[in-house]
Amino acid sequence: MIMMDKVVKRYNELIALDHFSFEAAEGEIIGLLGPNGCGKTTAINCMLSLLAFDSGDIEIFGEKVHPNNNSVKRRIGLVPQELSIFDKLNVYENIDFYCGLYVSDKTKRRRLVEEAIEFVGMDRYRKFIPKKLSGGLKRRLNIACGMAHQPDLLFMDEPTVAVDAQSRNFILEGIRQMKARGKTIVYTTHYLEEAENLCDRMVIMDAGRNIAHGTVEQLQNQISTQERVEVGVITDESDIESQLEALPNAVSVNRKNDNYMIHFEKQENNISNLIKFIESKDLTYTELSSEKATLSDIFLELTGKELRD
Amino acid sequence: MTVFKGILLHFWKYKYLILILLFVFFGFAYSFTLGNSGETYESQAMDLKVVDNSNSALSEGFIEHLERENNVESEDGNSADREALEEEIFLNNSDGVIIVKEDAERKFLNNEAPVETISDERNMTHIQLETLINQFFTFLEAEYETSGNMDTAMINEILSEDVDVQMHESVDVESENNFSYMYNFVNFAGYWSMLFLLMIVGNVMAEFNAPELRQRISSSPMTTRTFMVQMNAAQIVVGLFISGFMFLGGILLRVGHLEGIPLGKMAVALILITAFILSIHYVVGAMTTNKFIINGLANFIAIGMAFLSGIMIPLEVMGETTQNIARYLPLYYFTQIYAEPDISWAEAAMPMFILVLYTVAFLIIGMILENKKKMTS
Ligand SMILES: Nc1ncnc2c1ncn2[C@@H]1O[C@H](COP(=O)(O)OP(=O)(O)OP(=O)(O)O)[C@@H](O)[C@H]1O
Ligand SMILES: [Mg+2]
């Protein structure tokens, strides 16, 4: 459905996309993740031919993208990162305007606009102008404007920033429903958990490059950390850290006061080994928890950066 | 039609501002009517200044004629400084200055103008003064043709009776009056729609042209051409609506006083000035979407041009340089389209054409700027 091959985009000296390749299959939700300035928005703008790129190829629906390729554009929707709504038009008028760029039939459009209003849960606010909407509601309106015409392919550039948890779940549920109807969604976000729950596959970007991609499991297999165990022990021994590091499969240990975070490279009896070790020292543990490697571990290991909101 | 409708919807959001501006406009226009309507018009004593360069029997008789109902201050021809005289009019110290030419008698016999007047054309006393002067020379001519001499004393005697009343009621004065009112009305309407459209179209388009919105629209299947066509169509509809509303309003205010007015040419002039204003706006819009700058420019351009084009102050009283500049400004040609009550279409064609040229020139500048903007983004 989308095929982006070794695309290079330069802004003077700065290389925003560095031989970036990307593929999306029909009917999947694909996440585009990466720190600020890594080129997510740039990649989307190139795919929409809003930006000219220096080299490489982009095909959507099997056709080369081009600013005048309207048959392709008609099937695409965009929820831009920056709010693009008209300050003077109310909620209904805003959605109707954008929908009208794609759908000229009035009756059909009325139905689509109503569906979009319902999709973002803004029925109460339909007559409100953006000035009277909260930040999160504006975001929701921005989403409605991008998807009202029910495109086959929808780009959503950080759509849920500043949206509260409840409406976010509402929106994510809506996105899953769109997928169920066979739509393809390209989704960028800073919320890793959200991406983990929502996306079928993910592309991790850094400095304009595609550094890893695949399902969460595939990504987990690409890094050394497989399990993270946090344990609280009170002891006077100063070399407890190196002793913990000597445990089978342990990769690294980080200390935070009396808590120790141990990364294991395999998921095999790590907890029971740890408990045996603590008991052998006649110590007791105050707390103990274990977690599979998460996207943020993956992220940290692959990019050396933490990804935060 | 989405963009067309979207822009009209934006204008609709400015409906109160539009209403207020129209209301204020008609407020002004109505107050003109009170001061100037043909029915309430009565001759009043004017403060006149006469510079007598001729010192002849004719000039003496003429001055006597003027003095009958007005306050006249005579001045010797030698001490007259033209600029000082113009200033008198400009400062409203005097309703009119009449210069009797040196060989006034010979000029009169040769059918040349024996006197010259300086007065503010938009003032109603201007017409009264012209009428007053015409009376004298019309009678003098009649007298000369029948008897072969210029007996000014006899003419003054005739005129001192109730003839002037008849003159004031004559159709000529009435229609000249009508024209003068409508001329000023259309001048004002031109200025007002300039301010009005630059402000409102400027603001609406600044909102519509915000970069993130334009980018979002570019991601849709709407082509740039369709976008431009719909955008311009919406502006033209609004522009014509506003100037049409003013023009029809002006006609309604003056029903019954429309004789002797080149209404067709005035309508064309208003249409052309609307097109011209939209072309200015196109240039401004291509330069910036900053509302503050747009509003500032709107006022600057509208007031500046109005001032320099003789809409606010008569051109005749301005310095020569200013007058020369004014002759290059589009608003000047706007006023030239309907400058005379009996102007023919052939005469009006030239200023119309020049106004169209201005519009085209601005459109081309706008396109160049727009293209430049596209290339840098
Ligand atoms: N118009 C521009 N001119 C110059 N540099 C630009 C321009 N737009 C983006 N950049 C640069 O290109 C790089 C990629 O920007 P981009 O907006 O694609 O990042 P992003 O991944 O979307 O970031 P964020 O998470 O903050 O939205 C950044 O370093 C940015 O500074
Ligand atoms: Mg971005």
Image (cartoon, coloured by chain):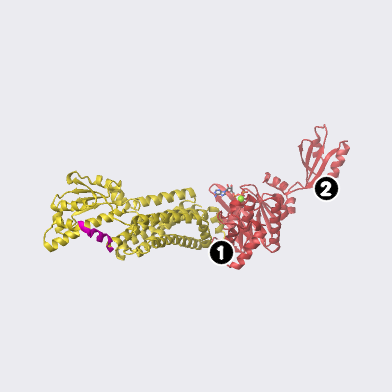
Chain colours: A red, B yellow
Badge 2 density bin: few <14, some 14–19, many ≥20, Cα 10 Å: few
Q: Which residues are magenta?
A: B160-171
Disc tally is 2
> In whole angstroms, how far apart are the C-alphas of marks 1 and 2?
55 Å
Label 1 sits on a secondary structure element that is: helix
Q: Is residue B102 left or right of residue B4?
A: left
Residue B113: name its quadrant. bottom left
Is residue A306 visible in the rendered image? The answer is yes
| Residue type of the residue flagged with mark 1 | Asn
* Dot 1: chain letter: A
Label 2 sits on a secondary structure element that is: loop
| Residue type of the residue flagged with mark 2 | Glu
What residue is disc 2 on?
A268
Q: Magenta part mainly helix, strand or loop?
A: helix
* Dot 2: chain letter: A
Camera-nearest residue between B262 and B207: B262
